[in-house]
Amino acid sequence: MANFRLCLFTLPLITLTFILQPFHVMSDEAMIINVCSKTPNPSLCQTCLHGDPKSATADVKGLATISITCGTRDADKLYTDTDNLYTNTKDPALHNLLDNCWWRFLGARDNIDSAGRMLSDKGSDAAKLAITRDAMPMITYCSDLFKKSPTVAVPKNITDEMNVVSTDCQIILGILSNF
């Protein structure tokens, strides 16, 4: 008799779980769309978040963490490419220009990465500060420096990567504004 009652209780529960499962996935996708709509580049935001399978079950804090990971990855590429160019260029003007930026890009990468630790340890306001006060000024400095030196041919991949990292920072801030 007890087994029959347990079966009557368990069967509807299992059925309900399978019926509601598609709605759970839909709400997570809706959250990603909603969170990314509050950023300056919703498409890049969604590409970043969908690139991590954990985004399917992440809350807003988890999505912010994933966006910080994307920003750190992009900033690392910018730093690596700039450092390689700095080390290998034969153009003295480009070498001098990059001398002011390769280490700033390294600092930006480290500061974006530290925003993840700040988010975990101290909350969204501390993470926002790591981006606005520590990371973004380093990217902005080099962007301004490149604009002030139009005769120096900075490769397009460097300027493109710099723009991506700048956008990543804005996306991170947009997601952090959901707290």
Image (spheres, helix red, strand yellow):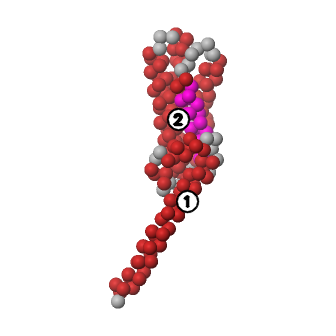
Above-or-below relation of 111 to 48: above
Q: Residue at x 46, y 51 (%)?
A: 54
Graded by Cα atoms within 10 Å as few (under 14), some (14 to 19) or many (20 or more), the crowding at tag 2 reads many
Q: Secondary structure at mark 1?
A: helix
Q: Position of residue 77 (x, y in %)?
A: 47, 30
Residue type at mark 2?
A: Asn
Disc sitting over residue 42 in the figure = none
Specify the label residue 27 is tagged with. 1
The percent position of residue 13, horizontal first and vertical second, equals: 44, 75
Q: What secondary structure is the stretch in magenta mostly built from?
A: helix
Q: Residue at x 53, y 20 (%)?
A: 155
Asked if residue 166 can be seen in this view, the reply is yes
Foreground of the two, 18 or 55: 18
Residue 88, placed above or below residue 47:
above
Question: Mark 2 = which residue?
Answer: 111
In the image, the segment drawn in magenta is 159-177
Residue 123: horizontal and vertical position, in percent? 56, 48
Residue 119 in the image, given as x and y percentages of width and height: 53, 46
Residue at x-position 48% and y-position 69%: 19
Query: Can residue 118 be seen?
Result: no
Of the two numbered discs 2 and 1 in the rendering, the one whose residue sits closer to the viewer: 1
Q: Amino acid at mark 1?
A: Ser
Q: Secondary structure at mark 2?
A: helix
